[in-house]
Image (cartoon, rainbow, N blue to C red):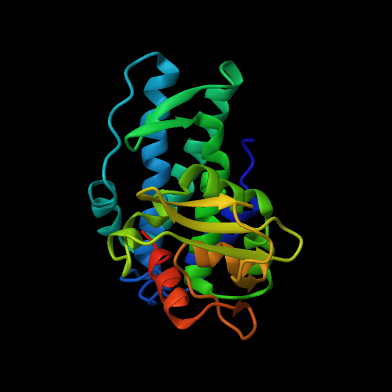
Amino acid sequence: MTDRSPEAEAFVEAVGTVDPGSVSSCDGWTTHEIAAHVTGIAVEVSRHLDPYLQGDPVPETRTFEHREAPLQALPHDQLLNRLDAEEVRMRTLVAGVLAVEPDAVIPWTGRRMAVAKFIPHLRNEHALHRWDVVGDDELSATLLDQTDLTEHSVEVLGRILLLAGRARDPDPDTDFGVPLRADGQSDLSVVVGGGEARLSWGALPSDRPGLECDPAARHLFIWGRHPEGQNRLISHLDQAQLTRLQVLLSGY
């Protein structure tokens, strides 16, 4: 558990290789700002786990803007050193908490988060944001193809991923359901009903028109990303349905 994950190794290499001013696929962010964002997550996780491990109160989670601003101000080489150190510190603290309390749960961004979930959460962040920096390559496909990372996105962030899109929903009062199908994995559905929007596994009939995707493309798509290459996302929807789906899954 204290070893750096393959996703983290790949991310650190990417942000250390690509020009820090390179515009990423995460809207409004350069490579440098992506590195600051991921470093900020590690800092914030440690800021929560250190007092928890000591038996002290866990502080409120700071906003992205609050924790990332001082990191963005660092020269890129200093930021990379900070990224390395904070990632090591975070992994050590996660391992320390789980060693004494495997089922530990802490306050996190206005909800409760199992400490063990920080492991797939950070792996997911590293895989997605590496793609933001370098785009599609064989390693991106390997990392983003992992079923457990897609499952983490759905189970822990399934409603959060739709909040921003739901605010821009072009037909907010009409129920909606579209399956996203990927070979070798369960159907994943985008569902609007009962006043809420959610991602759900296998919630719709197998003959319902939807999207056919490769697993990595589907993972990117639910995070509001647009995977490169032809035939990675094939639609069987009409134009209005596809437009609404893309708005709902426009990132957060």
Residue 148, relative to residue 230: is it above or below?
A: above
Q: Quadrant of the C terminus?
A: bottom left
Residue at the image point whose x is 39% and y is 77% from the top? 22
Residue at image position (56%, 81%) is 228
Q: Residue at x 60, y 60 (%)?
A: 10
Residue drawn at x 35%, y 71% is 27
- x and y, in percent, of residue 74 in the image: 29, 58
In the depicted structure, whether residue 48 falls above or below residue 204: above
The answer to whether residue 79 is visible is no
- Residue pushed farthest bottom? 230
Up-down: is 3 above or below 150? above
Quick one: which residue is furthest to the top in this view? 55
Q: Residue furthest right?
A: 184
Q: Nearer the viewer, residue 213 or 208?
A: 208
Place of residue 38 in the rendered image (x, y in percent of width and height, measured from the top left): 42, 53
Q: Give the side of residue 138 with respect to residue 43, left or right.
A: right
